[in-house]
Image: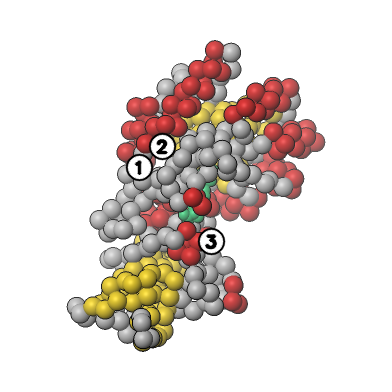
């Protein structure tokens, strides 16, 4: 939002989206993903603002969705149904029926039990469901434990030991078609080593199955590429090439095979800023609090994952600084955006910009305490 000009009477709290940065990020992603075997998808859960979805859909990439609602949003925004994957551990029968009716390209299946239900619903609908079986690779992504997904203890994916059973169900059903395997190890991954380990695990698994005459037309390696929350101005574009180089050098691609990616945070994270106004500067005996009009209802990441977002006072001319806790108005102690943060001397009415809030910000907003959902502003 560095260069974005805001209307002077803008209401807060409000997400400000830097659409130019979003487009530059998408261009960088597409340039880095030069390998013809790659198929890119956007993880809609990261940000489902229709304007954002439309811009991403225009690039022609696919969508990774986790509910009937997300499938609807993706189609409305212009994503081609055959490029939509439908994932999620708890798909309802109604969502499965809806996905079948729209002709989504792939169901990412999370359990043997779910596979049997999809086969049944597809039979009833006289449709074929293309499936990718999500395998739990048991890899530690070294990210916050609330957003790691590829460990055996997590609820996600089919245990490796049940994969044969799942494959047999697919082979037996005339309403299921095997597309391949799906993996996802976690989110906000800033060291690429876990991706290299994932490739090795996939290679070994493929060797084993290829020897038995079973081939996978697609391998989905998930999302998870991290962004720089500490210094977003220095690193507005994530290191897409770093991720793709690790995949290219470690993944043993089979002839004709596609590698699928489903990136969320790295596409939209840096283009969003949560703009908030200081309501009060409260002088306690121990601390000074900058009480702002945004709360965890607008951006829950600090409260839920102890996430640290860079916060800047964009109103003040002061160069003198002081130390503040930046807190919201919600009746919970976790409604804190920063503790002991050094800011320029801050006053009531100042705008604070909470950076890197484009991913898992507005899409996770809620109405606790009778609050309104945060508004958005799209700056071209
Ligand atoms: N694929 C699957 C199967 C996923 O579960 C996720 C994210 C993605 C792709 C996209 O991952 P990304 O590229 O955005 O890392 N709310 C948390 C993050 C939760 C991620 C959930 N799954 C946060 O704010 O950090």
Q: CA distance from mark 2 to mark 3?
A: 27 Å
Q: CA distance from mark 2 to mark 1?
A: 7 Å
Residue in the foreground of this view, choosing between 168 and 29: 168
Indicate whether 42 appears above or below 368: above
CB of mark 2 near ligand 1 (< 8 Å): no
The quadrant the N terminus occupies is bottom left
Residue at image coords 32%, 50%:
237
Residue at image coords 46%, 18%:
255
The numbered mark, 3 or 1, whose residue comes first in the sequence reads 1
Looking at the rendered structure, which numbered label has been put on residue 36? none
Residue in the foreground of this view, choosing between 221 and 320: 320
Outermost residue to the left: 319
Indicate whether 317 appears above or below 17: below
Instruction: Write down the residue under mark 3.
Output: 364
Instruction: Write down the residue under mark 1.
Output: 191
Tag 2's secondary structure?
A: helix
Indicate whether 114 appears above or below 160: below
Instruction: Write down the residue under mark 2.
Output: 194
């Amino acid at each position: 939002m560095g260069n974005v000009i805001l209307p002077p009477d803008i209401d807060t709290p409000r997400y400000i989206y830097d659409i130019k940065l979003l487009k530059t990020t998408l261009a960088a992603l597409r340039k880095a993903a030069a390998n013809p075997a790659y198929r890119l998808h956007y993880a809609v859960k990261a940000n489902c603002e229709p304007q954002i979805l439309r811009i991403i859909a225009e690039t022609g990439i696919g969508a990774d969705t986790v509910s009937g609602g997300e499938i609807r949003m993706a189609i409305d925004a212009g994503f081609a149904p055959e490029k939509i994957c439908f994932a999620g551990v708890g798909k309802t029968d109604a969502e499965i029926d809806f996905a079948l009716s729209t002709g989504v390209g792939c169901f990412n299946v999370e359990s043997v039990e779910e596979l049997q239900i999809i086969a049944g619903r597809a039979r009833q609908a006289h449709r074929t469901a293309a499936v990718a079986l999500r395998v739990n690779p048991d890899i530690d992504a070294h990210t916050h434990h609330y957003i790691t997904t590829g460990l055996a203890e997590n609820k996600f994916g089919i245990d490796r030991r049940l994969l044969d059973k799942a494959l047999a169900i697919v082979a037996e059903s005339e309403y299921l078609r095997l597309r391949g395997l799906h993996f996802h190890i976690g989110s906000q991954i800033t060291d690429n080593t876990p991706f290299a380990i994932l490739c090795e695990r996939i290679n070994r698994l493929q060797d084993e199955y290829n020897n038995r005459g079973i081939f996978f037309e697609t391998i989905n390696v998930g999302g998870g590429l991290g962004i720089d929350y500490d210094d977003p101005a220095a690193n507005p574009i994530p290191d897409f090439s770093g991720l793709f180089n690790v995949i290219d050098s470690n993944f043993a691609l089979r002839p004709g095979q596609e590698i699928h990616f489903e990136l969320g945070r790295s596409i939209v994270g840096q283009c969003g800023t949560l703009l908030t106004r200081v309501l009060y500067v409260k002088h306690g005996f121990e601390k000074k609090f900058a009480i702002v009009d945004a709360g965890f209802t607008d951006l829950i990441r600090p409260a839920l994952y102890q996430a640290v977002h860079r916060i800047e006072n964009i109103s003040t001319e002061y160069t003198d600084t002081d130390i503040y806790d930046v807190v919201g108005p919600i009746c919970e102690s976790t409604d804190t955006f920063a503790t002991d943060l050094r800011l320029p001397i801050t006053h009531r009415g100042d705008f604070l910009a909470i950076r890197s809030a484009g991913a898992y910000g507005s899409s996770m907003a809620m109405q606790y305490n009778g609050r309104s959902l945060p508004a958005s502003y799209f700056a071209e």
